[in-house]
Image (cartoon, rainbow, N blue to C red):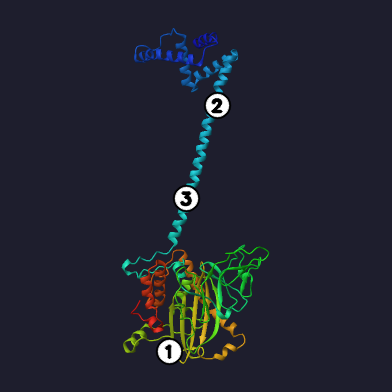
Amino acid sequence: MSSILDTCSLLTVAPATATRKGLRKSFAKSRADIAPRLAAIVGTEKKTHLDAPSDPLDVLNRDISYLEDVTGVPLLESVVDAHDQLVCLLNPLAAEERHKHLEKQVASLQRELDIAHTEVHDTEERLSGSIAYLSDLEQRVKRLSDAPAPAPAKPEKQRRRRSSGLESTLNVPNGLKEHWHPVCFSSKLPKDMMVPVELFEEDWVVFRDETGAAACLMDECAHRACPLSAGTVVDGQAQCPYHGWKYNGAGECTKMPSTVQCKGVGVKSLPVVEQDGLVWVYPGVESPGEVPTCARPPPGFEVHSELLIDVPVEHGLLLENLLDLAHAPFTHTSTFAKGWPIPDIVKFKANQMLSGNWEPYPIDMAFEPPCMVLSTIGLARPGQVERGVRASHCQNHLHQVHVCLPSSEGRTTLLYRMSMDFMGWTKHVPFIQRFWSYIADQVLGEDLVLVKGQQDRLSRGGDVWANPMPYDKLGVRYRRWRNAVGKGDRKEQATVEQEMKPMSAGELFAVEET
């Protein structure tokens, strides 16, 4: 221990400017010098103790190493720290330099801590995202495991896909404008009254001019775009309710109260023809042809009811529904088809071999361009449909005209006319029109549930004509005709129009033609 005290005495008298770095170099040098000597001593069997060292640093190095091995305490680091503290106490400049050095170390550690904190935060976020993804994946696997096993897919050759190239769309082709359209009944257009009409997403107004002839003008005043239909008819002219401007049947402004009359001001008008109890307009740009005569009641029939109904479905879907006879015994079980039998294919085949088509219902139907469905129903007696015969073989008949006007997107204006060749006295019964209106609403309500569903599926990519059946003949012909109009294919359009003849129920259900 005397050697340790001697060495400590040397350290106490060492200059105050000695640094940690210098002490470490000195101790390292002494250890490097003594290492070979210790190895030589250990390797010599004759010597039992070390020679007395002559260098105080060697003695100190040996003693410190011995004490560190015995106690397990890093004495050298403790001595160096004590030396640094002593230097700081004796030398203020050294203390300040040490303080700055410690501040830098603390700042560096703080930066490392901030980086580590950020990395931990990012890791937590990624871990949370992974846990959420695994949880969602677990739920999906659970749903799949709980779901029933899917039926084995059928080979493609077993699927019946017979669309025949038919395309259904909710978009109304502009080519439909190049036809005469009946927009209102003559009976619903009295003198001094204006009837608003929406056609191809445009607003029009129909009234009678000073001669009593029907006229059709754009329902928008040339002054401030006020609807003319909100006004009145004065001396056969449409008068705007805003500032009193008047328009004749040609759309010319004839009077501008409270100001100087301006020449050449007017509104757009459409060609109009009144025929067969209907007011027809031509909204196209080409030269109009002859007005169709198909809507007039057959000879011997009297009109019993004329209704105007707004229907919230696209007019093509409504037309196809009216041309579909096969749905009646399934859909209209509470109205006109209550108790109707479902056509039997066996009877069709048997009657075809013997005498032609079997007629399940005495009904004849036809599509007439651009938007009409005609039907004649044979009745054995009022309210009873006779089966097994054609409509022409029945004593009593009911004739129907359905006009489906494309008013706006997803909407149709339906003009319905019913005529009969018997019981003419019923049209004079009080409130009979309310009765017919009630019946029409009931029948239409049964159809709307289905057709609105079709429209929804069609708007989401559904295919209305994926698998047409033999009894879809009239609907297929209508769709072929409309597709040809949309593509401007005049040849195909003319071909389909030649095929458009009235068909009986037996012809509709015949399986030879698809």
Tell me where residue 187 appears, x and y as whole percent. 57, 81
Q: Residues within 10 Å of mark 3 (few under 14, many from 20)?
A: few
In this rendering, position of residue 367 left or right of residue 184:
left
Mark 3 or mark 1: name the one nearer the start of the chain. Answer: 3
Q: Quadrant of residue 496?
A: bottom left
Tell me where residue 19 appears, x and y as whole percent. 51, 14
Which residue is located at x 48 percent, y 18 percent? 67
Q: Nearer the viewer, mark 3 or mark 1?
A: 1
Q: Mark 3 belongs to which amino acid?
A: Tyr
Residue matched to label 3: 133
Residue 91 in sight: yes
Residue matched to label 2: 106
Choose between 406 and 63: the one closer to the eye.
406
Residue 29's disc number: none
Tell me where residue 16 appears, x and y as whole percent. 55, 11
Q: Mark 2 belongs to which amino acid?
A: Val
Callout 2 touching callout 1 (CB < 8 Å):
no
- Measure the C-alpha gap from mark 3 to mark 1: 71 Å
Q: Mark 1 belongs to which amino acid?
A: Ser
Callout 2 touching callout 3 (CB < 8 Å):
no
- Measure the C-alpha gap from mark 2 to mark 3: 40 Å
Q: How many marks?
A: 3
